[in-house]
Amino acid sequence: MALKKKARRTKDEGLNITSMMDMFTIILVFLLKSYSTQDISIAASSDLEIPSSTSNKEPELAVNLVVTKSQVVVDGVPVLDLTQIPDDDNPGQELASIPEDEKKGQMITRLYDRLLEKAEAAKALGEATGSAEHEFKGRILLQCDKTLPFTVVREVMYTAGQAQFGEFKFVVYKQDG
Amino acid sequence: MARRRKGIEHEDLDLIPIMNMVSILIPFLLLAAQFVHLAVIDSTLPAIGPPQEVEEQDEDDKPPLQLSVAITRQGITVAGADAVLNPEGAEGAPEGEDEGPTIPCKDGSCATVDQYDLDELIRLLHMIKDEYPDDENVILVPDGKVSYEVIVRVMDATREDPAKPNPDGSARLLFPFVVIAGGAM
């Protein structure tokens, strides 16, 4: 009799996972809500702070040109480093700039070569597939740090324009949502 | 009787398979979750090439607007083609003089983004849009030292104004097609 009672008690002491299930259900719903399949992603770092904007145009896949505080990156591959020059108007502060020996006029030669390669590759792909979806339209995604002076952005844009990328898409954080 | 009670006691839900599924789903969803939402702002290069034939002016004979917004560290200057932008009401500066920016910074110089008076810019653009409802282009001419964030903010301001919606609730579009010009060196 005593033995029987003991066995029954052990059985009742199973792990109570009801509360854990509650928690999991809530987490699951939350994660499902924030699930998204956006085409592009950004590598968060202190070097790259993207500005926020009220725009709500969805990003689409294109060549990814990233200009951080210290370097220029095309599709994940670093191309060149930026230098810091003193800011004439605000003594003690510095502005990022493209090194003079990388430039020919306003064009950044190394970036131009890399972008031209990308453009040629994209065109070849468009011709090989023959589909409108892969056709080369000169789209380029620009992710720039918000503290960059316009000089740098302009030179990068000019270089991209010379390399047949004429449709700029500035990547920004969506402000609400 | 006793036997039956024991049978009820054993009818516990078997949650183990669900637990298995959930513990696989959660890491997967965590990987795919996105906590920041991205958007893009479209812009094109200014067209380079021979000047295009000027379109015939429409019947009400308004000169083309060619709105441009220059951004410097002193403030924002709104300009149109050949003094189109001196309608009564817009407190334009006296003509012909090399005056300061149309919309000066709040504290004299724009060290931070918030010192640009974007509300005033939006107000001015509304007045221009009332005058030229069909115009949708704006040319941004930023100074070389203006930071990228300011340019994005000004693009936001010129694009649309959510504070003054259309009757159907959508934000009023001001000048959604932005072209960024080279700007002053």
Image: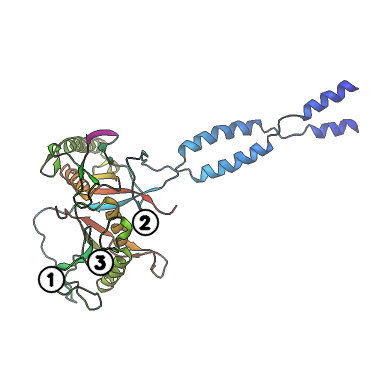
SS of the residue under disc 3: strand
Q: Which mark is residue B97?
A: 1
Label 2 vs label 1, nearer the camera? 1
- Magenta span: helix, strand or loop, mainly? strand
Dot 2 corresponds to which residue?
A: A54
- Would residue A31 be found to the left or right of residue B66 on screen? right
Could you tell me how far apart the alpha carbons at marks 2 and 3 are, in whole angstroms? 22 Å
Dot 1: few (<14), some (14–19), or many (≥20) neighbours within 10 Å? Answer: few
Dot 3 corresponds to which residue?
A: B103
- What's under tag 3, amino acid-wise? Ile
Of the pair B7 and B104, the residue shown nearer to us? B104
| Chain letter of the residue beneath label 3 in the structure image | B
| Chain letter of the residue beneath label 1 in the structure image | B
**Which stretch is magenta?**
A76-83
Residue A140 visible in the snapshot: yes
Q: Residue at x 60, y 31 (%)?
A: B20
Quadrant of residue A84 within the rendered picture: top left
- What's under tag 2, amino acid-wise? Thr
Residues tagged 2 and 3 counted as in contact (Cβ below 8 A): no
Q: Quadrant of the N terminus of chain B?
A: top right
Q: Given the current orientation, which residue lies at the most extreme bottom position?
A: B88
Q: Which mark is residue B159?
A: none
